[in-house]
Amino acid sequence: MHDGELFVTGRIKDVIIIRGQNHYPQDIELTVESSHPALKISSGVAFSINFNDSEQLVIVQEVERTYLRKLNVEEIIGNIRKAVAEEHDLQAYAILLLKTATLPKTSSGKVQRSACRDSFLAGSLDVVADWSVNAQYKNYFQHLKSEVESLWQKLQTDNLSSSSSESVNERLPALNNQPKSKNIEEIEAWLLAKIAEHTQILPVEINIRQPLAQYGLNSLAAVRISGELQEWIGREFSPTLLYDYPTLEGLARHIADETSAEDFAPQKIKTESGKYSEEIAIIGMGCRFPKANNPDAFWQLLRDGVDAIAEVPTSRWDNYTCYGGFLEQVDRFDAQFFGISPREALGMDPQQRLLLEVSWEALEHAGKAPDKLAGSQTGVFFGISNFDYSQLQFDLNTKFDAYTGTARFKTCRLPVKLKRKGEIPATLAL
């Protein structure tokens, strides 16, 4: 209270929000420090900055003193980018390697993310090597644009402008007017230019036989490249094409084989109205809502206009808030039915328990016998927003054991319980 006015304050957020998804910096920092032995344990920071009206990931990491003299910067940066892309589906905007014992920390040894972010923006960190997507931030990438454009120049035909100042985006429409039958060399050159453009890596440094994840290519960039590719070739491709063929060489060979197998005429990509559609039948449902543990109860709650918000049960917590929406019996779980040991069940995220229960109920509601799904063409898809429960366990200094890791979601648990033996791995859609 100040001058009769109430001010509500709180800590500056550490959570990183990129493309609407929450990322905990501790998880990214653990991934980074584990990516290479030259990186010092518990001496890294991940934070976000606003660049061009979007949140961008910055990684600052100390180097072990014994590695400073013979520091393989290219290998370390590559390992960090690959690990972050594979584990978190994120593309780093900047990576800075610091001298030992120079990262801002408290007197008790905790990293100071806000102070580190301020030092990064002020350019006052003791940097031994760095890398950035922003070509203006690091002179090493000043020739990237000309390198990319030189690759496009190889794809030109005589009727295209030969001006060296023409940008890649200006060349693209003209390229789309050319015949769609492409040989493997043309496809490799096109893919190399696009991957260099999206990852901000010099084309000469991209090995066409290495996995694309090695260069920090995330899922968003992969889908965009797939879309641009189908416009350039003149035919549709799966959005997951770059995951089905994870090396540039394999991808180019597959595309060349497909296009040469049929002498197709150039055709426009189907518009939204021209796409084929099939009806989808929902044959079973399961749910958990406050005051409604199944679809029938939820429908009745809606029909009767019942307010599911109630006072906080005495069994939950005190002094936080008076009202809320709460699921019933979240601490009850038939672990034996799902083949889970009692000890492991204690560390499971409640969302994971609910997922198993509700999925099983949905199959029962549909009249489907789960043991009959083995070998069938069945997919399991589910979405989860975050994993606060596991973070809470770390914050409370819960004793770690062999089951600590299962507090997070395991996409294989549900299909294994459905006796599908992992024949079609589940997909976790976030």
Image (cartoon, rainbow, N blue to C red):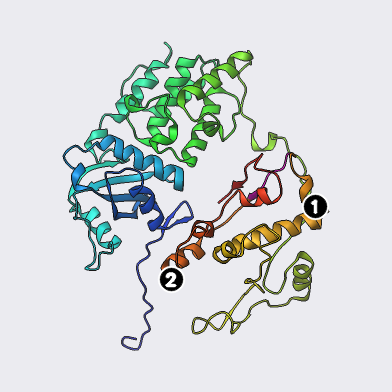
Main SS class of the magenta portion in the image: loop
Horizontal side of 21 relative to 145 (left or right) equals: right
**Marks 1 & 2, CB-CB < 8 Å contact:** no
Q: Is residue 53 visible?
A: no
Front residue of 378 and 199: 378
200 over 335 or under it: above or below: above
> 10 Å neighbourhood of mark 1: few (<14), some, or many (≥20)?
few
Check the image and report above or below for 142 versus 59: above
In the image, taking residue 320 as reference, residue 153 lies left or right, namely left
Tag 1 residue: 283
Indicate the quadrant where residue 305 lies.
bottom right
Q: Residue at x 64, y 34 (%)?
A: 271
Foreground label between 1 and 2: 2
Element carrying mark 2:
loop
Residue at point 25%, 62% (across, down):
115
Q: Residue furthest right?
A: 367
Callout 1 secondary element: loop
- Determine which residue is flagged by label 2: 396
Q: Residue at the spot x=78%, y=43% of the render?
A: 279
Q: Position of residue 149 (x, y in %)?
A: 35, 24
Q: Earlier in the sequence, mark 1 or mark 2?
A: 1
Tag of residue 20: none
The amino acid sitting under disc 1 is Ile
Distance between the alpha carbons at the discs numbered 1 and 2: 42 Å
Q: Nearer the viewer, residue 40 or 183?
A: 40
Q: Position of residue 92 (x, y in %)?
A: 36, 45
On the rendered structure, is 335 left or right of 136? right
Picture quarter containing residue 189? top left
Q: Quadrant of the N terminus?
A: bottom left
User: Residue 216's x, y, as percent?
Assistant: 40, 39
Write the start and end of the magenta stretch as one range. Answer: 377-381
Amino acid under disc 2: Leu
